[in-house]
Image (cartoon, rainbow, N blue to C red):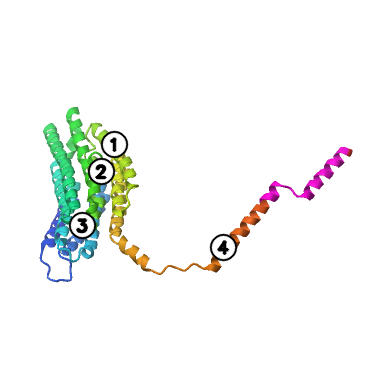
């Protein structure tokens, strides 16, 4: 995948540039030219996965890269219709491509510095995407909360990078296994904080429910791919010889799983339920990684991403479907059918009662036969 990774990066950079180019036709949503380089990036990510399967090298990273790029293209195709006429559409296409670039860079990185750089690019792009939802008070609250929580996580990750590099003298991910006990505990705890912040888990969970006010394409990208990166970070730093990080991530994940599940049951709006459902799923994901079940976490990431993307993209048209169903004429109930059904139910109930009575209370003929047999027995 050494040659495919730079080509994938170039394709995503081309998507960012294409989103900013002026469009000659007025019938196309501004910025939607980014879809075509995104399609090329998806093809390259598919080749990268095939190469990883053939060489048995970093299959999880290649699969996640393909998942992120493909979902970004799908959401961009949806946004080309959903954001038509929206003056912020060009910014969405550019920032979504940039977020995909940062995520794939972090996935393909072999050293902690490049991983943290891609992680931060993805964070800043997502904060800008959340801010593109408008200028209302709900959007301002979402931007403020997400910026605080996510930047705390990024600061923790960069601090972990500094500590690991100073302790091992190397920026390679392979050198994490040689950390001393104190440095390993610090790095593990800081990485757990970064993963918790990205996953929207307790105690940095307040930013994720606030993003329910953002646009549907941004919500789909946020819940289908962005928050799942916490599992990848824990997987990349799994060689750290300390149980401090897994314990922190596990406790935070378990608490989030319980709190978010209860909160989901109290929300009446569709997107609010989906948001808390995502938080609960991310809590389960952190708990699985803390227990060392990375295979389970990997399968859960893919399933959750595909499922939540379809739900959020479908939530945008839920009101339209409800209005369409309400506009259809309601079927008139049939009186004949009601009478027939009542007779069938009543007849069935009567037959059942008679059968039960006959089974529990013997008839007079049966009683006389029993008495006759008893009298004959006494004479004999």
Q: Earlier in the sequence, mark 3 or mark 2?
A: 3
Is tag 4's residue or tag 1's residue first in the polypeptide sequence? 1
Q: Residues within 10 Å of mark 1 (few under 14, many from 20)?
A: many
Main secondary-structure element of the magenta-colored stretch: helix
Q: Residue at x 25, y 43 (%)?
A: 231
Depth order, front residue of 19/367: 367
Q: Secondary structure under badge 4? A: helix
Given residues 309 and 351, the one toward you in this image is 351
Q: CA distance from mark 2 to mark 4?
A: 56 Å
- Give the image quarter of residue 23: bottom left
Q: Which residue is mark 3?
A: 44
Quadrant that contains the C terminus = top right
Is disc 3 in contact with disc 1, using a CB cutoff of under 8 Å?
Answer: no
- Identify the residue under disc 4: 341
Distance of label 3 from label 1 (alpha carbons): 35 Å
Question: How far is mark 3 from mark 2, CA to CA?
Answer: 24 Å
The residue lying furthest to the right in this view is 379
- Tell me whether circle 3 and circle 2 mark residues in contact (CB < 8 Å): no
Instruction: Specify start and end residues of the magenta stretch as a single range.
Output: 356-378
């Amino acid at each position: 995948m050494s040659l495919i990774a730079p080509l994938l990066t170039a394709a995503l950079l081309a998507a960012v540039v294409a989103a900013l180019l002026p469009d000659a036709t007025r019938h196309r949503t501004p910025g939607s030219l980014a879809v075509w380089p995104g399609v090329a990036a998806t093809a390259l990510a598919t080749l990268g996965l095939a190469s990883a399967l053939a060489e048995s090298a970093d299959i999880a990273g290649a699969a996640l890269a393909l998942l992120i790029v493909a979902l970004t293209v799908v959401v961009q195709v949806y946004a080309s219709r959903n954001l038509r006429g929206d003056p912020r559409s060009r910014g969405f296409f550019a920032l979504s491509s940039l977020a995909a670039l940062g995520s794939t860079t972090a996935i393909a990185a072999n050293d902690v510095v490049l991983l943290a750089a891609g992680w931060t690019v993805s964070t800043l792009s997502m904060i800008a995407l959340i801010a593109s939802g408008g200028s209302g008070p709900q959007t301002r609250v979402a931007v403020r909360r997400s910026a605080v929580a996510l930047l705390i996580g990024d600061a923790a990750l960069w601090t972990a990078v500094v500590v690991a590099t100073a302790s091992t003298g190397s920026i390679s991910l392979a050198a994490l296994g040689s950390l001393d006990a104190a440095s390993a505990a610090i790095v593990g705890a800081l990485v757990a904080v970064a993963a918790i912040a990205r996953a929207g888990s307790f105690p940095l969970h307040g930013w994720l429910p606030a993003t329910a006010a953002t646009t549907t394409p941004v919500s789909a990208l946020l819940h289908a791919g962005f928050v799942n990166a916490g599992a990848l970070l824990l997987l990349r730093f799994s060689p750290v010889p300390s149980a401090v990080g897994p314990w922190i991530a596990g406790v935070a994940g378990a608490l989030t799983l319980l709190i978010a599940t209860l909160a989901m049951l109290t929300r009446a709006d569709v997107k609010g339920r989906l948001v808390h459902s995502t938080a609960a799923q991310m809590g389960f994901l952190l708990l699985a990684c803390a227990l060392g079940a990375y295979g389970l976490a990997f399968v859960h990431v893919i399933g959750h991403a595909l499922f939540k993307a379809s739900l959020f993209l479908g939530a945008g048209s839920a009101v339209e479907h409800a209005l369409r169903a309400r506009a259809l004429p309601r079927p008139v109930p049939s009186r004949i059918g009601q009478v027939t059904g009542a007779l069938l139910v009543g007849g069935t109930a009567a037959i059942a009662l008679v059968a039960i009575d006959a089974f529990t209370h013997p008839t007079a003929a049966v009683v006389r036969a029993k008495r006759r047999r008893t009298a004959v027995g006494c004479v004999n």
